[in-house]
Image: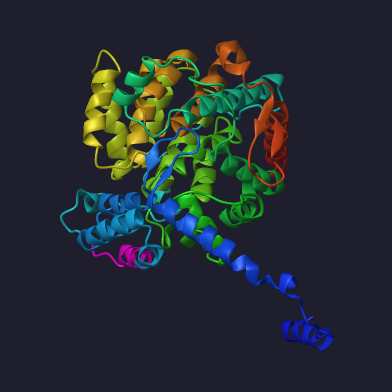
Amino acid sequence: MKAWLLEREIIENAQPVVLAEEEQTWDQAEKLEADEDNKLKTLWSSRVPGSGAPERVIVGAVQSMENMGFDISKTEVLVEQGLQALDRNDLAELNRVTARLFYELNHLPKDSQSEYWKYQQFASWEDYLKRVSFPVYPSFDLGTPEFEAQILSGWTAQICGGAFGTALEGYTTDNLRRAFGEIRDYVRKPNTFNDDITYELAFLKAFAAKGYQVTSEDIAEEWVALIPFGWSAEDVALRNLKSGIYPPESGSFNNPFREWIGAQMRGAICGMVAPGNPGQAAHLAWLDGVISHSNNGVLGEVFNAIMVSMAFIEKDVRAILKLAVGLIPEDSEYYAVVSDTLHRCMTAESWEEPWRQCELKYRKYNWIHAYPNAAAEVVALWFGNGDFDETMHLSAMTGQDVDCNAAQIATVIGIINGSSGIARRWTDPIGDDLVTYMREFKNIKISKLASWTVASARRARIQSGQSL
């Protein structure tokens, strides 16, 4: 039926009524106002839900735009004005300043002196594909019990790593060490509730339906259907999607966080459903990444997807790391980050020397940005050298966005070593339960998630005309 007919039907059937005062809906106005004010304040000052670390997301947006080579001089006065308004609890002024700040962030001039513009920008999968050459492995057999075991141990490791890191994210090495010493175990009773895995589950829902023909739009619609809210880049992307702005524009439009860690934190699932096929994993990661990120932000997801895919074939973590770095375009800034960190690791005797150098080098980047976290991943993988306990120890001690880093690289280790490589002190407190805030997935068994992943990968392989 045409829209005008639907609307005409409503008004023609509407019978006038007189509402009692308590039946009128205006009494919701104060609650709506309070909800909007709280959302606004959270942009300016909040605590990370899992760790209690302080953060100012909107200040991070300004920081991020400078990292991406823009002149932010006009915005710095607005930041001061906003912080002052927050201190006074002047919500009218805070709304004005916030609107103006986002306007300015969307109209910043380029800083021609920024190092950022010396690197190649990657706007499409085709741009990326022109600059890399993927290794070709024999077709990985998806029909074996070994594959099932690898997927289960990969998910188990990832969920344990995420639960471990959730209590630690948003802090520096020095402050973590002062508080906890050398961190080698959960610092509190762990839980699986975080915002990272939600996007991997949404990807898997779309992939289960479409297989290797899945599109960015397919995945994006699962985001809208299943994920009620997001943070930083994902929050912007969800608002864009709900307004009808689809990928890749959803990842770049009005999104100052587009090179933060949000795509990098979800690459593992793309590697899990493309075992032994790093090119295919990279493509899936690109399709997923552009929903909320662009350029180096997307390359971060590609990097993790490639490592997880290779873990089904290669058994030497350091070899995987070297190969994955080599599959990032050499003229990208992301390559400069991971290759420089890898070189520092290869010429150092212990983890802390290269990490301290990276900590200093990337001090101007937010702790949620892809770069310091990519460096932390490289350090933990190199010096962890395939040992789950030591890799988790180093993920913790490098700080930054610990749950994202620990979860992604734990997946690599879990796939290589199997469940026997993960001590029960990691798995027993988690059990078989994954709890999220997603629609349809508030409670799911990890074993069921693993079976679903295996079945989806097998179905996709068959649909693509290949044998298992």
Q: Residue at x 58, y 31 (%)?
A: 275
Q: Is residue 166 left or right of residue 460?
A: left
Q: Observer-nearest residue: 303 or 23?
A: 23
Rendered image quadrant of residue 429: top right
Please name the predominant secondary structure of the magenta segment in the image. helix
Q: Position of residue 111 (x, y in %)?
A: 19, 58
Q: Position of residue 311 (x, y in %)?
A: 52, 24
The total of numbered circles placed on residues is 0
Q: Which quarter shows the N terminus?
A: bottom right
- The color scheme shown is rainbow
Please determine whether, in this image, residue 298 is positioned above or below residue 175.
Answer: below
Q: Observer-nearest residue: 36 or 371?
A: 36
Q: Observer-nearest residue: 336 or 249?
A: 249
Q: Observer-nearest residue: 54 or 62?
A: 54
Q: Is residue 427 left or right of residue 208?
A: left
Rendered image quadrant of residue 243: bottom right
Residue 346 seen anywhere in this rendered image of the structure: no
Q: Position of residue 51 (x, y in %)?
A: 46, 32
Q: Residue at x 47, y 59 (%)?
A: 37
Furthest-front residue in this view: 21
Please determine whether, in this image, residue 188 is positioned above or below residue 361.
Answer: above
Q: Position of residue 425 (x, y in %)?
A: 57, 12
Q: Which quarter shows the C terminus?
A: top right
The magenta span reads 97-110
Answer whether residue 105 is magenta in the image: yes
Residue 105 seen anywhere in this rendered image of the structure: yes
Answer whether residue 249 is magenta in the image: no
